């Protein structure tokens, strides 16, 4: 799992790491642009090493909407869930394959 927050890793994603569930691994890496995701994809492929693994980006969009590249047809990510918590406050989960 990768977390995304404007200029810093998201605190909600980091809270998942505190659960201690061995099935959840949180990488506190901020994905701001598509090129930044491209940089970490080789390392994520090595991490998966043939295992069945799902990678996610949690976008905490309370201050800023998701970047357009995340929803573009060429994006490696796809929106899998969104939670709206009032005007301007939503949380969006994207899944991607490294």
Image (cartoon, grey):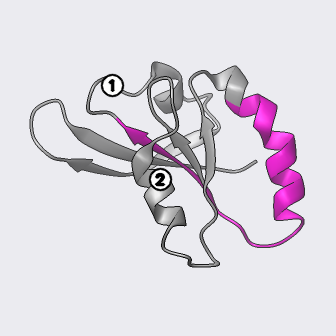
Q: Nearer the viewer, residue 78 or 60?
A: 60
Q: In which quarter of the image is residue 79?
A: top left
Image position, residue 89 (x, y; %):
20, 36
Question: Looking at the picture, does residue 36 appear above or below residue 47?
Answer: above
Which quadrant: the N terminus? bottom right
Q: Give the range drawn in magenta.
A: 37-60
Q: Is mark 2 on a helix, strand or loop?
A: helix
Question: Looking at the picture, does residue 18 appear above or below residue 93?
Answer: below
Q: Is mark 1 on a helix, strand or loop?
A: loop
Q: Would you call the spot at circle 1 few (<14 residues within 10 Å), some (14-19), or many (20 or more)?
A: some
Q: Would you call the spot at circle 2 few (<14 residues within 10 Å), some (14-19), or many (20 or more)?
A: many
Q: Nearer the viewer, residue 47 or 12?
A: 12
Q: Residue at image x 50%, y 23%?
A: 7
Which-is-in-front pick, marks 2 and 1? 2
Image position, residue 98 (x, y; %):
76, 48
Tell me the number on the disc at residue 74. Answer: none
Image position, residue 67 (x, y; %):
45, 22
Q: Is residue 21 within the magenta segment?
A: no
Q: Name the residue under label 2.
A: 13
Q: Determine the CA span between mark 2 and mark 1.
A: 18 Å
Question: Looking at the picture, does residue 4 appear above or below residue 7?
Answer: below
Question: For this view, does 98 lie left or right of residue 45?
Answer: left
Q: Mark 1 points at which residue?
A: 65
Image position, residue 22 (x, y; %):
64, 78
Q: Quadrant of residue 77?
A: top right
Work out which residue is located at the far front of the displayed protein and give it.
18
Q: Nearer the viewer, residue 21 or 40?
A: 21
Is the C-beta separation of discs 2 and 1 under 8 Å? Answer: no
Q: Residue at image x 71%, y 21%?
A: 35
Question: Which label's residue is closer to the chain start, 2 or 1?
Answer: 2
């Amino acid at each position: 799992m990768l977390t995304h927050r404007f200029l810093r890793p998201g605190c909600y994603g980091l809270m998942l790491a505190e659960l201690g569930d061995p099935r959840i691994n949180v990488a506190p890496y901020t994905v701001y642009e598509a090129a930044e995701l491209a940089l970490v994809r080789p390392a994520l492929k090595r991490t998966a090493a043939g295992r069945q693994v799902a990678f996610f980006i949690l976008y905490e969009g309370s201050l800023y909407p998701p970047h357009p590249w995340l929803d573009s047809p060429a994006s490696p990510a796809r929106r899998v869930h969104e939670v709206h918590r009032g005007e301007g406050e939503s949380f969006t989960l994207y899944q991607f394959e490294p």
